[in-house]
Image (cartoon, rainbow, N blue to C red):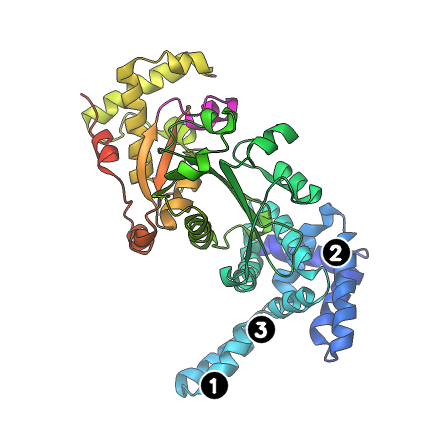
């Protein structure tokens, strides 16, 4: 991997079209005058914007090699600190270890439009990582800095309604990642008095939502998505609602992947709702299980004990008979097989959430202190839901007073789950 990285970096140095950008980057990190820093940062931004996508791999390779710490300096500083662990020697070691590219990113961030450009750059980098794992060190620097700059304390919560700007409403439609918004009429339904939509903004990106959350105000914990999206508006429902269902959380900025905001945003929205509607008693989600079908396909007949093996064989036999199931196929599934499917989903979420094939939505909510509350059969009969989750959806319960404890449980490789889920974990023979 290192050889490939060196080849890419050498290619960048020899590429005349890349030379101006790399030269601007070097000038930017060496410049002392503040006015020149702004001008050079803008120069870097403009030159990166015009960089063909095919050359970005070589550019990031150049950052990985030419803007890294010097091994000899790190070793010398580490040796001095080991021999004499003073505050001064520690400061010298810290300075030697920090990659120069971190200072480059800091200086780019100071320029107008710099923050948005860094998010765009990281999005490009994330697209290259799969085939270039040696660029992980560059990504680690992006993630380190973005996690500081996008500290949840900096974020502003704003309710989105039909009176919000057309530009913002268009972005909500465009970025909806869980349940597609089919048009303006569909969006308007999601902004009615018995629904809520909240967006989070950063001071440096006042017109660019980072994340938005869609909420349904209902009586009971929802068990299917269609009634939430397709039901007729009820203007009086909000006043009597006892349950807030978070049914869609969408990230508008892919460059922020890995920056943890979830615990904050769930708590913030819940606090906002509690202030407005103090009668609300339950805060929960209705969430997809996008990793479930993939996990099922990867399982063999050694899922555990004999009962689990039998359940897995029955479900796999049904899936082989219905390789592209339609909604009627799932609805017609025998009751016993429904239990098998729900039980396997529960097993997946409880036992595999910390593994490579673990469900990303489950990790998000469990890591943010939710409890796995219920598995719902035939809850999402859309094409996407059938393909990814075999039509299943789950409820995660947010007991706001317990989220810290449950977060710690997840960090200790435990998945907090309800008695209803525990019953599913005992399959029929």
Q: Is residue 77 magenta?
A: no
| Residue 89, numbered label | 1
> Are the residues tagged 2 and 3 within 8 Å (C-beta)?
no
- Circle 3 is placed at which residue position? 70
> What mark, if any, has residue 278 been given in the picture?
none
Q: In terms of sequence position, does the residue under pointer 2 or pointer 3 come before the other?
A: 2
- Residue 183 x/y as whole percent: 64, 29
Nearer to us in this view, 342 or 1 = 342
Quarter of the image containing the C terminus? top left
Determine whether the residue tagged by mark 2 lies in a helix, strand or loop. helix
| Mark 1 Cα shell of 10 Å, populated few (<14), some (14-19), many (≥20) | some
Report if residue 14 is visible in the image. no
Nearer the viewer's eye, disc 2 or disc 3? 2
Report crowding for label 3: few under 14, some 14 to 19, many 20 or more residues within 10 A (C-alpha).
Answer: some
SS at mark 3 in the image: loop
Q: Tell me what residue is drawn at x 34 percent, y 13 percent.
A: 333
**Lower position in the chain sequence, tag 1 or tag 3:** 3
- Camera-side mark, 1 or 3: 1
What are the residue bounds of the magenta stretch? 377-389
Q: How far apart are the alpha carbons under marks 2 and 3?
A: 26 Å
Badge 1 marks a residue whose secondary structure is helix
- Identify the residue under disc 2: 48
Q: Earlier in the sequence, mark 2 or mark 1?
A: 2
Residue 355 appears in the figure: yes
Q: Position of residue 83 (x, y in %)?
A: 40, 86
């Amino acid at each position: 991997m290192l050889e490939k990285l060196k080849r890419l970096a050498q290619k960048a140095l020899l590429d005349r079209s890349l030379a101006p950008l790399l030269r601007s980057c070097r000038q930017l990190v060496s410049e002392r005058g503040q006015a020149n820093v702004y001008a050079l940062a803008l120069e870097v931004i403009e030159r990166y914007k015009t960089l063909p996508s095919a050359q970005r791999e070589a550019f990031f390779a150049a950052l990985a090699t030419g803007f890294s710490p010097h091994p000899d300096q790190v070793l010398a500083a580490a040796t001095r600190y080991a021999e004499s662990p003073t505050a001064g020697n520690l400061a010298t070691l810290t300075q030697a270890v920090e990659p120069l590219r971190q200072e480059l990113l800091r200086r780019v961030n100071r320029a107008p439009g710099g923050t948005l450009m860094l998010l765009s750059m990281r999005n490009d980098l994330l697209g290259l990582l799969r085939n270039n794992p040696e660029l992980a060190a560059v990504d680690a620097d992006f993630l380190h800095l973005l996690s500081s700059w996008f500290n949840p304390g900096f974020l502003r919560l704003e309710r989105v309604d039909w009176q919000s700007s057309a530009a913002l409403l268009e972005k909500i439609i465009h970025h909806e990642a869980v349940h597609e918004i089919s048009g303006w009429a569909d969006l308007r339904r999601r902004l009615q008095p018995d629904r809520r939509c909240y967006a989070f903004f950063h001071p440096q990106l006042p017109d660019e939502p980072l994340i938005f959350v869609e909420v349904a105000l209902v009586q009971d914990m929802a068990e299917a998505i269609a009634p939430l999206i397709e039901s007729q508006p009820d203007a009086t429902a909000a006043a009597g609602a006892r349950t807030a269902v978070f049914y869609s959380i969408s990230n508008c900025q892919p460059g922020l992947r890995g920056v943890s905001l979830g615990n904050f945003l769930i708590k913030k929205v819940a606090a906002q709702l509690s202030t407005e509607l103090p009668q609300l008693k339950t805060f929960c989600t209705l969430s997809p299980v996008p990793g479930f079908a993939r996990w099922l396909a990867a399982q063999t007949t050694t899922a555990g004990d004999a009962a689990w093996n039998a359940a897995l064989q029955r479900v796999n036999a049904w899936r082989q008979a219905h390789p592209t199931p339609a909604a009627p196929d799932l609805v017609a599934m025998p009751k016993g097989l429904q239990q098998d499917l729900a039980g396997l989903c529960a097993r997946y979420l409880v036992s595999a959430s910390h593994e490579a094939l673990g469900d990303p939505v489950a990790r998000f909510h469990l890591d943010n202190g939710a409890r796995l509350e219920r598995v719902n059969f035939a809850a999402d009969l859309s094409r996407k839901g059938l393909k990814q989750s075999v039509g299943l959806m789950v409820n995660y319960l947010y007991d706001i007073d317990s989220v810290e404890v449950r977060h710690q449980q997840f960090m200790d490789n435990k998945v907090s789950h309800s008695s209803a889920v525990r019953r599913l974990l005992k399959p029929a023979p």
